[in-house]
Image: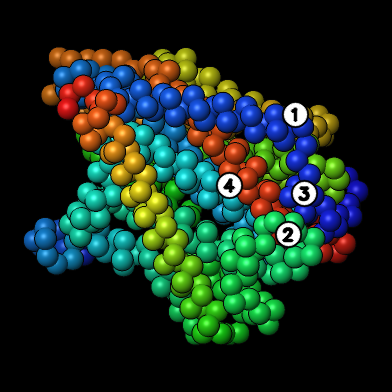
């Protein structure tokens, strides 16, 4: 594993496989890949319900980051758009 | 401790009857949340200068303090919480079924609070989404911060999916006992529900539990989260292979305390909930809290011993500073005393007491919060580099920062109170299993 990470580290920063790419997509997410495979390939199975599960995952990712984006825009409007509540250094 | 007989009516009681205690708790929690919002508003209007978090190198002191310590604390409670639920499903530990959904909800609530702590710590929170998303393809290569955001998102999403899938059957079966006014919510939860899907969903939940139980201890709070610190060689207090086990043991200790505390509050608030969450469950959670706190204390011993005996300069310096700090010993006592209390109960020297368990749970939760904040601060106060040697500083949390702990705690309580008015926070099968259930840790 060390040799693999060393080899990856020598690659260009913006292209190729870096240590974090291996860590996140090659190690951390493996249980999630197995889970999705189990949903669609395991028994008992129902593609419709498995798709519902995938839909939940997609919806929660979108609502988490979408909700955070809305919150951040409210903070921008209130505090960083040059209004009376903006920080003194702006 | 006799086996109780709880019914589905008990499960829906929190949804139907808000008591005076409920309103009192909601009021106090709202005040805490408002204090936090005001404090954060002051910080946004004046900048992070209102905290004691300085520019490292010019202002002395530290750049990470209470906010990050509290973040680790919330993430720890969250990660440990879902482990209970996943273990119940995967290892078929029916005894803990009554607290499985509480653990799932604690994970979702505590992770949200952890996210708030990160946002609060940003100088320009309005830029967070754009900068994270746009830079992700490059930052994921080498940045533990990018990994951290990935796994927190992953963890939140997996837990929410797990809860959503397993909730469908319960809502369907309890529908006639649930308030009509919330029908739109229940219709959304039951989107395309068919009772025949139950065995499939049960299997999907099993796969989810498998993924979670591998991810949580090995890769998340025993991996990516502590790597935020453990990979930084310029901070001897953080660096090293022991950091991850320390984080995991602290997380599991505080999570057991957290789940137990929430369970005790619901038992106190609602009639006959001592049947829904029997004494055996509290006893067992206390036992596990003791086991994990023992591991935590043992790892602290390792850290102190290695740091005190012929350690490299940087390691020795931070170990000496930690040991000289009375706050550290307060944190250790807050964990060691409950450990002793649980052990004495287990060995029959002390009688089992719900009040005592509640105090023990609060103590370990506070102890972990203090220890994790101190860990964060001392890593930065005693770096290996001498670049900032001429601008030494200290760190004391400001009221602005402390308000975030108060506020997120209040928000978590409000979250639980709100959710308990929408859905049953104990699974139906926990009640169904009561008759055949037997004890055992």
Chain ID, mark 3: B
Q: Is residue B291 visible?
A: no
- The answer to whether A38 appears left or right of A20 in the picture is right
Decide: few, some or many residues near mark 1? Use Cα within 10 Å; few <14, some 14-19, many ≥20: some
Q: Are marks 2 and 4 on the same chain?
A: yes
B64 or B179, nearer to the observer: B179
Disc on res. B106 = 4
Mark 1 or 2 closer to N-term? 2
The label nearer to you, 1 versus 2, is 2
Secondary structure of the residue carrying tag 4 is helix
The label nearer to you, 3 versus 2, is 2
Mark 4 or 3 closer to N-term? 3
Secondary structure of the residue carrying tag 1 is helix
- The answer to whether B49 appears left or right of B341 in the picture is left
The label nearer to you, 4 versus 3, is 3
Residue with the mark numbered 1: B356
User: Going 77% across and 49% down the picture, which residue do you hit?
Assistant: B16
Q: Are marks 1 and 2 on the same chain?
A: yes
**Pointers 4 and 3 in contact (CB under 8 A)?**
no
Mark 3 or 1 closer to N-term? 3
Disc on res. B291 = none
Secondary structure of the residue carrying tag 3 is helix
Which coloring applies here?
Answer: rainbow
Quick check: B75 above or below B85?
Answer: above
The label nearer to you, 2 versus 4, is 2
Decide: few, some or many residues near mark 3? Use Cα within 10 Å; few <14, some 14-19, many ≥20: few
Mark 3 or 2 closer to N-term? 3
């Amino acid at each position: 594993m060390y040799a693999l990470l060393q080899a990856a580290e020598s690659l260009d920063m913006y292209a190729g496989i870096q240590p974090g790419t291996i860590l996140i997509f090659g190690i951390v997410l493996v249980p999630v890949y197995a889970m999705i495979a189990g949903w669609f390939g395991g028994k008992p199975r129902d593609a419709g319900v498995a798709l519902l599960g995938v839909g939940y995952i997609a919806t929660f990712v979108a609502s988490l980051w979408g909700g955070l984006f809305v919150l951040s825009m409210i903070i921008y409007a209130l505090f960083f758009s040059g209004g009376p509540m903006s920080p003194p250094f702006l | 401790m006799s086996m109780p007989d709880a019914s589905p009516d008990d499960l829906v009681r929190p949804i139907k009857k808000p008591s005076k205690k409920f309103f009192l708790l909601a009021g106090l929690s709202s005040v805490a949340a408002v204090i936090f919002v005001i404090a954060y508003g002051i910080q946004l209007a004046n900048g992070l200068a209102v905290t004691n978090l300085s520019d490292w190198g010019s202002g002395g002191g530290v750049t990470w303090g209470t906010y990050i310590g509290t973040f680790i604390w919330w993430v720890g409670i969250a990660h440990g919480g879902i482990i209970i639920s996943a273990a119940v499903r995967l290892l078929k530990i029916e005894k803990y079924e009554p607290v499985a959904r509480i653990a799932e909800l604690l994970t979702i609530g505590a992770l949200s609070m952890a996210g708030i702590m990160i946002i609060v710590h940003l100088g320009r929170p309005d830029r967070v989404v754009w900068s994270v998303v746009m830079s992700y393809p490059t930052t994921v290569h080498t940045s533990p911060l990018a990994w951290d955001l990935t796994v927190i998102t992953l963890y939140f999403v997996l837990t929410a999916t797990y809860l959503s899938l397993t909730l469908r059957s319960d809502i369907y079966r309890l529908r006639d006992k649930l308030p009509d006014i919330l029908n739109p919510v229940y219709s959304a939860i039951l989107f395309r529900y068919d009772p025949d899907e139950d065995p499939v969903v049960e299997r999907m939940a099993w796969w989810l539990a498998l993924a979670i139980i591998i991810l949580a201890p090995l890769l998340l709070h025993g991996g990516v989260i502590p790597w935020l610190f453990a990979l930084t060689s310029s901070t001897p207090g953080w660096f090293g292979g022991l950091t991850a086990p320390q984080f995991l043991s602290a997380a599991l200790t505080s999570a057991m305390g957290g789940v137990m505390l929430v369970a005790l509050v619901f038992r106190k608030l609602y009639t006959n909930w001592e049947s829904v969450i029997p004494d055996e469950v509290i006893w067992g959670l206390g036992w596990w809290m003791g086991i994990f706190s023992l591991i935590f204390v043992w790892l602290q011993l390792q850290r102190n011993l290695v740091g005190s005996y012929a350690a490299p300069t940087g390691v020795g310096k931070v170990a000496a500073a930690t040991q000289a700090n009375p706050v550290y010993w307060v944190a250790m006592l807050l964990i060691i005393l409950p450990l002793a209390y649980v052990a004495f109960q287990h060995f029959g020297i002390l009688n089992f007491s719900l009040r005592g368990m509640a105090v023990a749970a609060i103590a370990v939760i506070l102890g972990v919060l203090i220890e994790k904040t101190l860990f964060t601060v001392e890593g930065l106060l005693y770096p290996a580099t001498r670049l900032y040697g001429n601008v030494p500083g200290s760190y004391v949390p400001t009221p602005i920062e402390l308000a975030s702990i108060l506020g997120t705690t209040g928000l978590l309580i409000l979250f639980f109170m709100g959710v308990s008015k929408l859905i049953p926070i104990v699974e139906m099968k926990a009640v169904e299993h009561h008759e055949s259930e037997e004890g055992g840790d």
